[in-house]
């Protein structure tokens, strides 16, 4: 049975998109029965062009990705919920339900954000 990990960031246009893309690639390479999804609390119109370019350089295409709002069902059904900027209060879930990752702003330092997310994802995949 496949378990879902849900990555969240407020605008669903940068951090959560990067995290889900990296997680899905690494989980598949390792043969894990996990899949990542992503969403936000205040979705932007489109994925950040910086993110599209960063991931394109790694042969991951998110150009057609459409930011969307997280649902209560997704929060309830995910085996794990990891947030990069969304608070449990705004998600209306118990603080113990949400893991918080502190990641630099993609818009201010794309390389640092990308490296921080990848380091977290690698540790997570090793843990699973």
Image (cartoon, rainbow, N blue to C red):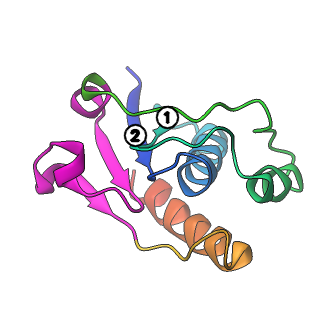
The residue depicted at 61 percent of the width and 65 percent of the height is: 118
Q: Dot 2, crowdedness within 10 Å: few (<14), some or many (≥20)?
A: many
Of pointers 2 and 1, the one earlier in the residue sequence? 2
Q: Nearer the viewer, residue 45 or 69?
A: 45
Identify residue for label 2.
5
Q: Is residue 51 above or below residue 68?
A: below
| Label total for image | 2
Task: Please state if 86 lies on the left or on the right of 58 as rendered.
Answer: left
Q: Is residue 112 above or below residue 1?
A: below
The residue depicted at 49 percent of the width and 73 percent of the height is: 103
Q: Nearer the viewer, residue 48 or 3?
A: 48
User: How much space separates mark 2 and mark 1, taking CA atoms?
Assistant: 6 Å
User: Residue 71's spot in the image, x, y percent?
Assistant: 32, 27
Task: Please state if 73 lies on the left or on the right of 42 as rendered.
Answer: left
Q: Magenta segment, which residues? A: 74-101
Q: Dot 1, crowdedness within 10 Å: few (<14), some or many (≥20)?
A: many
Q: Residue 88 bears which disc, if any? A: none
81 in magenta: yes
User: Residue 69's spot in the image, x, y percent?
Assistant: 43, 33
Identify residue for label 1.
37
Check if mark 2's residue and mark 1's residue have beta carbons within 8 Å: yes
Task: Give the secondary structure at mark 2.
Answer: strand
Task: Give the secondary structure at mark 1.
Answer: strand
Give the quadrant of the N terminus.
top left
Task: Report which quarter residue 119 is drawn in.
Answer: bottom right
85 in magenta: yes
């Amino acid at each position: 049975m496949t378990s879902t990990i849900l990555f969240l960031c407020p605008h669903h246009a940068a951090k959560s998109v990067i995290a889900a893309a990296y997680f899905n690639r690494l989980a598949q390479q390792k043969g894990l029965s996990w899949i990542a999804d992503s969403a936000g609390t205040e979705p932007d119109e489109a994925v950040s062009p910086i993110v599209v370019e960063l991931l394109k350089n790694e042969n991951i295409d998110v150009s057609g990705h459409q930011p969307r709002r997280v649902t209560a069902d997704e929060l309830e059904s995910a085996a794990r919920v990891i947030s990069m900027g969304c608070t449990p209060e705004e998600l209306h879930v118990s603080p113990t339900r949400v893991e918080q990752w502190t990641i630099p702003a993609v818009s201010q330092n794309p390389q640092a954000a990308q490296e921080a997310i990848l380091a977290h994802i690698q540790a997570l995949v090793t843990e699973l």
